[in-house]
Amino acid sequence: MSSLLISASGVRGIVGEALTPEVAVRFSAAFGRFVKGGAVVVGSDTRTSNEMFRYAVFSGLLSTGCTVIDVGICPTPSLQLLVESLGADGGVAITGSHNPVEWNALKFIRGDGLFLYPEEGERLLQIYQEDRIRRVAWDRIRKVRREESAIENHIRRILSVVDREKIKRKGFKVVIDACNGAGALISPEVLRRLGCKVIKLNCEPNGIFPHPPEPVPSNLGELSRVVRNEGADIGFAHDADADRVALVSEKGEVPPPHYSLLLATRFVLSRKPGTVVTNLSTTQALEDIAKEYNCELIRTKVGDIYVSRCMREKKATIGGEGNGGVIIPEVHYARDGIAAMALLLEYLATCQRPVSELIKEVPRYYMIQKKVKFPRENFPSLEGNLKRKFKEDELNFLDGVRINLKEGWIHIRASGTEPVTRIISEARTKEKAQALYNLALEYLKLSRK
Ligand code: MG
């Protein structure tokens, strides 16, 4: 039996094991109390288990006096934007995001369209754990209202921040792989309105995933082939709720998903220098790009809400995460794979060079990412051991441990979404990255009780 994973932004688990309709009703009722019986927008990705969870979420919300605004299948960034546009009190996204099909999750959204801040997530959890969540009497139970505008609202916002005519003039040929997720309902249409010749791959929003939905190179072989065979200018891939986007070059090369953030950042800073925000696990190449434009880069804890929140507070120009989650403030402070796709097309139209060349110009690093079993309780001992070995300014304890060295960096942290410890190392070469990774393993071994 897998366990339910509860974090500040929501609750996730394997459907039918840890994540049941009972859990969804209770969490949604807790959220209903959290928003004091206000208006809550509910949307989901395409997973087949969502039909069950939608009704459970509706019930929980209605039982606490909320008005439910049902947007049906909807990319998470479209849902987040609609919460803000409608002036609703909150939102619930039912999505397992990039996780395999047997997973699902509820993510809770504030009235401004951002995910709950960690301290708010704690408060929600307190309500969830109360013996009895207070429900309303029969005469205060409201209705579920269907709302059809989420996707059009999002498309209009995206098209208002890019140079439509410039992109249209290029008549790009674009392949989009939506993994039969929610992005299928929006990205082909955005591309069409940008004057692209659109080749749809896995764009049936039926929740039957033809490959694992995480947009990483190992899952994008088909996209790469289709881009090459069709002679397309570029290929894009989303995860199941389309808050992420990865790209494929006209030659069929599939770089790691952080290239969408790297290219978007280079384009945005070249026009409008400003602060860049990312998390502690994201590639050094982003820092190098920020430096090229004399811009500051701020690193936060891992978790999209930390990046979003910091971007808003610092009025950042652009930001995001290495997993393909790009945040473009003119659209909103949420990760948005669809807006990022449009922005990257504007970059292509502006620079007049193929994607493969833009990829080549990005500073090269080699990254190793692995998961290991290392209990959370051993972190204090690990910190002690590292403090004895490294200088103070080489260590950062904001989120687990990050060791910054001349030859590269190592980040060791307990995962927020899985019961494992993640180790990431990065250096200019594979050998150096491997040496750093081995060093991390040694310290873990030393710090085991
Ligand atoms: Mg996602």
Image (spheres, rainbow, N blue to C red):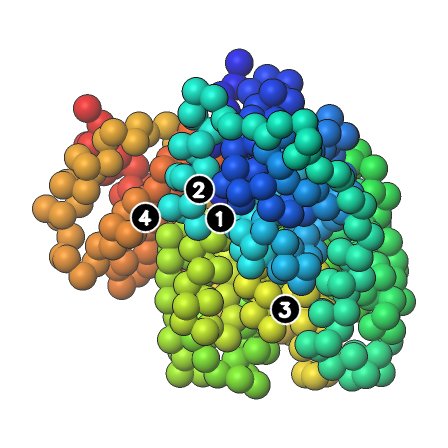
Mark 2–mark 1 Cα distance, whole angstroms, equals 6 Å
Residue that numbered label 1 is attached to:
116
- Mark 2: few/some/many CA within 10 Å (<14, 14-19, 20+): some
- The residue pinned by badge 4 equals 399
Within 10 angstroms of label 3, few (less than 14), some, or many (20 or more) residues? many
Which marked residue is nearer to the observer: mark 4 or mark 1?
Answer: 1
- Residue 257 seen by the camera: no
- Number of the label disc, if any, that sits on residue 339: none
Quadrant of res 175: bottom right
> Which residue sits at x=60%, y=73%?
330
Disc with the residue nearer the chain's start (3 vs 2): 2
Q: Are marks 2 and 1 in contact (CB under 8 Å)?
A: yes
Q: Residue at x 63, y 54 (%)?
A: 88
The tag earlier along the polypeptide, 4 or 3, is 3
Q: Position of residue 395 (x, y in %)?
A: 22, 54
Element carrying mark 1: loop
Lower sequence index among marks 3 and 1? 1
**Mark 2 = which residue?**
121
Q: CA distance from mark 3 to mark 2?
A: 25 Å
Residue 366 vertical placement versus 357 (above, below): above
Residue 136 sits in quarter: top right
Dot 2 or dot 1: first in sequence order is 1
